[in-house]
Image (tube, helix red, strand yellow):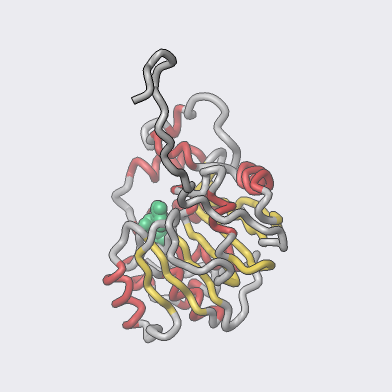
Amino acid sequence: MTLASERFPRSSRYDPDWIVAGASGGANPLWLTEWLTEAMALRAGMRVLDLGCGRGLSSIFLHEEFGVQVWSTDLWFSVDERARRIHDAGLDDAVFPIHADARALPFAAGFFDAIVSIDSFVYYGTDDLYLGYLARFLRPGGQLGIAGAGLVREIDGPVPDHLAAWWEPSMSCLHSAAWWRRHWERSGAVEVESADTMTDGWRRWLDWQHAASPDNGVEIEALTADQGRYLGYVRAVARRDDRALDEPIVSVPVSYAERPVFRDQPPS
Ligand SMILES: C[S@@+](CC[C@H](N)C(=O)[O-])C[C@H]1O[C@@H](n2cnc3c(N)ncnc32)[C@H](O)[C@@H]1O
């Protein structure tokens, strides 16, 4: 297994055994992070939230490649295991492991210069209200970028026969670049800069499956049968502008007023 690719020169510097040993999903996080950051403007010293970072490979990559500080944040995977990987990479002072839910983030408003999310945003970001919540953590002018498995075009109607054996109901969260553009534009929270699909993304998805999960026959067969008609990698980048964003509602103050429940009930 080499995982080396002319398409991804930055990712090709990393040891394939290190990549596979730290994999947390069905995609190569370094390929997706390299692709996403080609559409972003990261500069050394920036504060970056890596949201849904899994076991932290993308967080280490972001620091190594761009010199940014990274808040490496995830829900499902052990923060302790990630901390060891970060420590062994010599990055204790630059990549900070955090265990948190994307819907309840422990950060100050306007703290981040950029937010990236690799193969994760679909798990929470399809909520119409979510982008308004997340954008508050960006400084005005800061960028949000997402990249991950998605659709080349939306599936209108039943799931195509060639995908049926692989498909699960939760995959309804997969969407096309055009869907994400519209979803973000409607939020009124950001200016969308780009939304597109990786050229031959399905082939890269398949390459990764063959390298990292060769026994995953159902997914390999679905990708092979699909030939990029529906499945691929999707990327979207937006920028927070100067618009003020609503504070999240965490409580509504009320005081109790005694009243009879029924019209003909005598006062007590
Ligand atoms: C398919 S994995 C991808 C992980 C990693 N970014 C990668 O590409 O290898 C999806 C990730 O999304 C994270 N995730 C899902 N829901 C989340 C939530 N509500 N808050 C934070 N992370 C979440 C999971 O913890 C998981 O690590």
Q: Position of residue 70 (x, y in %)?
A: 48, 75
Q: Residue at x 66, y 61 (%)?
A: 240
Evaluate whether residue 7 shows in this view: no
Q: Is residue 43 left or right of residue 231?
A: right
Image quadrant holding the N terminus, namely bottom left
Evaluate whether residue 2 shows in this view: yes
Q: Nearer the viewer, residue 12 or 27?
A: 27
- Corner quadrant of residue 194: bottom right
Q: How many marks?
A: 0
Q: Nearer the viewer, residue 185 or 105?
A: 105
Q: Position of residue 223 (x, y in %)?
A: 45, 43
Q: Residue at x 27, y 71 (%)?
A: 80
Q: Nearer the viewer, residue 147 or 249?
A: 249
Image quadrant of ligand 1 equals bottom left
Q: Residue at x 55, y 32 (%)?
A: 155
Q: Position of residue 25 (x, y in %)?
A: 38, 56
Q: Is residue 268 left or right of residue 199?
A: left
Q: Is residue 255 left or right of residue 130?
A: left
Q: Residue at x 59, y 43 (%)?
A: 176
Q: Position of residue 123 (x, y in %)?
A: 44, 48
- Corner quadrant of residue 89: bottom left
Q: Is residue 132 left or right of residue 73?
A: right
Image quadrant holding the C terminus, namely top left
Going by the picture, which residue comes out furthest to the top?
Answer: 264
